[in-house]
Image (tube, helix red, strand yellow):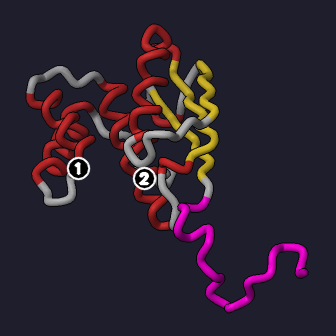
Amino acid sequence: LGPHSMALPGAAEAEAAILAAAASAGGGEDAADAAEAAVQGQLRPWEAELWMTMRSAASVAREMRSSLGTACLAQVYLAEDVVDEADEIADRTLQYIRRDNKAADPLLTCAIVPKLPKGGLVEVSLLCGPAAASATAPRADGDDDDATGA
């Protein structure tokens, strides 16, 4: 979701970002939940990474006129260090997706890998469809024909 030159934030940096997002006007429910955990000192490193990853994914999906709620496939890659928390991480990933659409039911796969880039603990790959409004909107070029040209 970011250039490979970007470094992953440490827990303290992620907590600061979460608190800043919660304080901003558009922080939303996930920022408030994460901020509460951060303030209480209960935020685990994988939670900070997942929060930042899903926040970035939501921004990318919005830019592409979609949302996390349209996800049909979520691939979660976990470092061996968090293998014992795989079920919780998968559940949390679904919670983030379902904040946009409570009925979302993407295929979710979880793979344990020996090592993730930059020493990360969690990486998520999403395949999202078009948002409902944009799926029925006419194309910008005025051509409403389908891909077959009919």
Query: Which residue position holds label 1?
Result: 28
Tag of residue 58: 2
Q: Residues within 10 Å of mark 2 (few under 14, many from 20)?
A: some
Q: Specify whether residue 137 is painted magenta.
A: yes
Q: CA distance from mark 2 to mark 1?
A: 12 Å
> What is the count of numbered marks?
2
User: Residue 147 at x, y = what percent?
Assistant: 84, 73
Does residue 119 show up? no
In the displayed structure, would residue 49 be above or below residue 69? above
Question: Would you call the spot at circle 1 few (<14 residues within 10 Å), some (14-19), or many (20 or more)?
Answer: few
Type of amino acid under label 1: Gly
Q: Mostly what secondary structure, the magenta segment?
A: loop
Q: Secondary structure at mark 2?
A: helix
Q: Which residues are magenta?
A: 130-150
Q: Along the horizontal axis of the image, is 111 left or right of 47?
A: right
As drawn, is 102 to the left or to the right of 114? left
Foreground mark, 2 or 1, reads 1
Above or below 73: residue 39: above
Residue type at numbered disc 2 = Ala
Residue drawn 41% across the image and 18% down it: 88
The residue lying toward the viewer, choosing from 146 and 126, is 146
| Residue placed furthest toward the top | 84
Q: Is residue 140 magenta?
A: yes
The secondary element bearing badge 1 is classed as helix
Q: Residue sitting at 45 percent across and 32 percent down?
A: 93
